[in-house]
Image (cartoon, coloured by chain):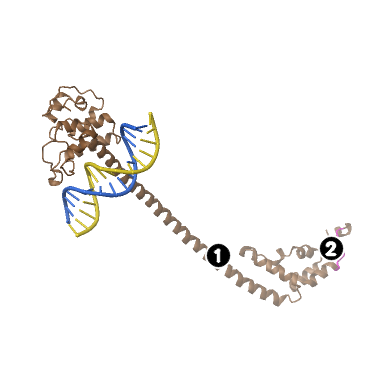
Chain colours: A brown, B yellow, C blue
DNA sequence: GCAGTCAAGGGGCACC
DNA sequence: GGTGCCCCTTGACTGC
């Protein structure tokens, strides 16, 4: 294998001369993606990185042959007797810029980057794979944070609704308690003043308990329409009713006794 | 010593 | 079957 490999054809002669001086090449750069490779990479090789010892010992492929070789042909040879080393700062920076332009590595761009950075193409491919994995991890973390915030917001809203619901339930129970006490008092009053009432009237009172507070403020006459309809027929009975408990059975008998007021045939027109 | 990071190995899978 | 990608793991390295 020689320095005149396929990858070297992607770069201008000046660029390649600066990048890989031992491998002179006069091929012209013809790749449409050549813009993905920074042009100031001549200092990448053999220069100590700016951030200390972490990447000082490794610059990828050490020879032009390794840089231009295929993955299968150069991997074992390049790493023979050499431990793994980190990429230097400029190599990572260049790869990051290329990654920002596209996280999928086309074969052409892989070769360009490999030649430009003095790495084997497989190293570039592996770096992109690992970079995609790191990007995915960060993306998952971001998604998790978004979902977490949404969950917290919904949870807070749910708790507020539950507290409001509990408050409303307490109010309902309080109102029902007041209704029960009012009903007891009402029953005591009615029982004391309407001793002749039948059990049916008690049922009517029970029905009252099911009405609202506003409805209970109305007089019992509205709840006993039958008696109400009868009263105009007999002023006496009406008088008695005002004195006696309203809707009492005696009032009913009194009204029935006056048939002229109760029966609907023409005679009852006399009342008008 | 240990945890974290990163380059690289290797298996599995899809696509051609 | 070859290739590339994803995923998980390994091993080297670093900072504390």
Residue at 36% from the left image edge and 47% from the top image edge: A143
Q: Chain of mark 2?
A: A
The majority secondary structure of the magenta stretch comes to: helix
Check the image and report above or below for C2 versus A261.
above
Around disc 2, counting alpha carbons within 10 Å, would you say few (fewer than 14), some (14 to 19), or many (20 or more)?
some
Left or right of A263 on screen, residue A9? left
Kindly report which numbered mark, 2 or 1, lies closer to the viewer in this rendering. 1
| Residue that carries the numbered disc 1 in the rendered image | A172
Residue at 70% from the left image edge and 76% from the top image edge: A191
Residue A187 inside the magenta-drawn segment: no
| Residue that carries the numbered disc 2 in the rendered image | A262
Q: Chain of mark 1?
A: A
Q: Which residues are magenta?
A: A257-264
Around disc 1, counting alpha carbons within 10 Å, would you say few (fewer than 14), some (14 to 19), or many (20 or more)?
few
Residue A233 point in image, percent of width and height:
81, 64
- Image quarter of residue A269: bottom right
Residue A220 point in image, percent of width and height:
70, 67
Residue at 18% from the left image edge and 32% from the top image edge: A67
Check the image and report above or below for A242 versus A57.
below
Q: Secondary structure at mark 2?
A: helix
Residue at 16% from the left image edge and 31% from the top image edge: A65
Pick whichever, C7 or A205, lies toward us: C7
Pick whichever, A147 or A52, lies toward us: A52
Residue A130 point in image, percent of width and height:
27, 42
Which circle's residue, 2 or 1, is located before the other in the chain?
Answer: 1
Residue A93 point in image, percent of width and height:
20, 38
Q: CA distance from mark 2 to mark 1?
A: 44 Å
Which quarter of the rendered picture does the N terminus of chain A lie within? top left
Looking at the rendered structure, whether the residues under marks 2 and 1 are on a common chain is answered as yes
């Amino acid at each position: 294998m020689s320095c005149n490999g396929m990858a070297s054809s992607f770069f201008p002669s000046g660029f390649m001369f600066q990048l890989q001086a031992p491998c002179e090449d006069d091929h012209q750069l013809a790749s449409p993606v050549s813009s993905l490779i920074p042009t100031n990479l001549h200092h990448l090789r053999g220069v100590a990185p700016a951030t200390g010892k972490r990447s000082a010992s490794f610059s990828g492929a050490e020879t032009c042959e390794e840089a231009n070789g295929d993955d299968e042909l150069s991997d074992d040879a390049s790493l023979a007797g050499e431990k793994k080393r980190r990429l230097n700062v400029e190599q990572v920076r260049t790869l990051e810029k290329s990654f920002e332009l596209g996280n999928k590595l086309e074969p052409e761009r892989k070769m360009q980057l490999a030649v430009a950075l003095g790495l084997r193409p497989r190293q570039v491919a592996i770096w992109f794979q690992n970079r995609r994995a790191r990007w995915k991890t960060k993306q998952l973390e971001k998604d998790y944070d978004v979902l977490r915030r949404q969950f917290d917001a919904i949870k807070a809203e749910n708790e507020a609704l539950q507290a409001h619901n509990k408050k409303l339930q307490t109010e309902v129970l309080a109102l029902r308690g007041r209704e029960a006490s009012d009903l007891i008092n009402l029953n005591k009053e009615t029982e004391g003043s309407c001793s002749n009432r039948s059990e049916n009237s008690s049922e009517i009172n029970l029905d009252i308990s099911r009405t609202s507070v506003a409805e209970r403020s109305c007089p019992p006459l509205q709840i006993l329409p039958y008696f109400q309809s009868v009263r105009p027929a007999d002023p006496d009975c009406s008088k008695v009713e005002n004195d006696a408990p309203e809707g009492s059975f005696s009032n009913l008998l009194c009204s029935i006794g006056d048939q002229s007021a109760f029966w609907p045939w023409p005679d009852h027109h006399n009342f008008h």
